[in-house]
Image: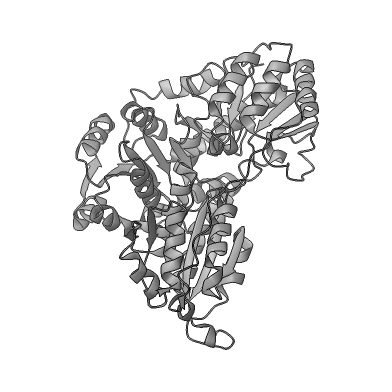
Amino acid sequence: MATAAELLIRCLENEGVDKIFGIPGEENLHVMHALRDSSIEFITVRHEQGAAFMADVHGRLTGKAGVCLATLGPGATNLITGFADANMDRAPVVAIAGQGATTRMHKESHQILDLVSLFKPISKYSVEILEPEIIPELVRKAFKDAQAEKPGGAFISFPENIAGETFDDAILPLKVQSPFTPNAPQVKIQQAAELIDAAKFPLIMAGNGVIRNRATDALLSFAESLNIPVAETFMAKGSIPFSHPLSLGTVGLQARDYIACGFDRADVIICIGYDMVEYHPHLWHPDKDKKIIHIDLNYAEVDAHYILQSGVLGDITDSLTRIAAQTKKTHAGKTDNLKGIIMEELDNYTEDKSYPLKPQKILFDTRKVLADEDILISDVGAHKMWIARLYRAEAPNTCIISNGFAAMGIGVPGAIAAKMAYPQKNVLTITGDAGFMMNSQEIETALRNNVAIVIMIWNDSEYGLITWHQEEHFGHSNNTTFNNPDFVKYAESFGAKGYRVEKAEDLVGTLQRAFDDNTVVVVDVAVDYSENMKLTEKLGKFVCPI
């Protein structure tokens, strides 16, 4: 006779799970014991938040649910930030937490929380295992819900006494099935094509759904065949190569940037795989005067600034191919070299030798070192805004930005997950000193598992993004500064390597050396965030060149 915990592991194997990120505990003893004979690798982490972030980035990069495991009480609550990030960033994750015995859940008891209710508002599915017999159905539903559009989180609570129960060996995992993705009806295809033909200045806004649904090739063909410029959200960077002449770059900075000029002029905006959590429509459609075409697998969210002229629901690749075939007009592809403004800005800093280093210089040099298919994981902070705006992503899923939930601390664990998923690629995380210290303990996890990542810290000894906002609103900042350890010695104390960039000319060589070291490397870079307010001032005076 097998235990319910063993049945759970068989069901996870059946779903194709190859890794579980987590921490063992008393209430998941049976699960940990069952894993001893499993093909699934358990990655022991140093904090449950790190486990959830690893599952988050694994899910976002691969499209297959990342799995994380914790014990009850504080173990489970420590999962919440990373789990909520995955759910709002549309990354498939299945989180499993041990729970106290059902014999004590009806009363006040040590470490007992109603975990199902706790996770329910931040998940697509939240459930408790109350009988061994239901495990195959429950696990299959968790993965199906987590991976279906829009992807997100599924949570399973596993009481310790149920985990140890035995069951009839005839109970087997269920067949893994995925729903067939329907194609949009022809009437909607024709409607969208007619709107595009009638447009004077159409504009495409690509969202993360384009990448999730592997529709980037179709997006590029669609844009080229109709000659329509493309703007990307933060989470869709790389959906069209930055170097492509129809690429406008990234939209989402909550200030008037050059790309806003394209939205100002546009009369039809074609939103493809777009999600409101990425960039709210009141910011790019304040006057409600544009015609909006929504192309996605899911219906549009209700919002006064996002009233559709046409909604095309179905397989994105199929929809784009059929709409392009129906259109009769090729557009001007007019961008007035708006992207050239960004390129000029980058070019102005290519030889900048000032110290501390300016964000523009750091990102220009970083792009020189990373290959097009290498992966950059951005933590959350002031650096995220610069990465979103200036990092030139050439391929999908090569610049990962959390911008739905936007949780600090994702950088280091996210980079570990990315390298585990794609060991042949160089993986870099750019993190602020604040975000780094939130999950820096996972350096040990990376070293123990021989995961070679490079961690670049933008060091300014403050919560730079909050300072930026405070200065913009009030002309001063307060309570945003702190002290840092010596990051080089800190890295070395783990057994990792650490380098400090002492002058601007050394950054490229230091990064190349860090990747050649083939281990965990921390690169400490002093950043000049006086550029933040200069950018605010510049954008405040920006006038569209059209």
Please, is residue 35 above or below residue 511 in the view?
below
The image quadrant of residue 437 is bottom left
The image quadrant of residue 305 is top right
Viewer-proximal residue among 10 and 287:
10
Q: Is residue 81 left or right of residue 442?
A: right
Please, is residue 140 above or below residue 252 in the view?
below
The image quadrant of residue 19 is bottom left
Give the percent coordinates (x, y) of residue 459. 35, 47
- Can residue 122 be seen here? The reply is yes
Give the percent coordinates (x, y) of residue 384. 47, 42
Quarter of the rendering occupied by the C terminus: top right
Q: Residue at x 37, y 46 (%)?
A: 415
Give the percent coordinates (x, y) of residue 220. 56, 22
Q: Residue at x 67, y 39 (%)?
A: 297
- Can residue 258 be seen here? The reply is no
Q: Is residue 144 left or right of residue 198?
A: left
Q: How is the image coloured?
A: one colour
Q: Residue at x 24, y 56 (%)?
A: 448
Quarter of the rendering occupied by the N terminus: bottom left
Which residue lies most toward the front here?
170
Q: Residue at x 62, y 47 (%)?
A: 150
All told, the count of numbered labels is: 0
Give the percent coordinates (x, y) of residue 502. 24, 38
Viewer-proximal residue among 224 and 499:
224
Viewer-proximal residue among 4 and 52:
4
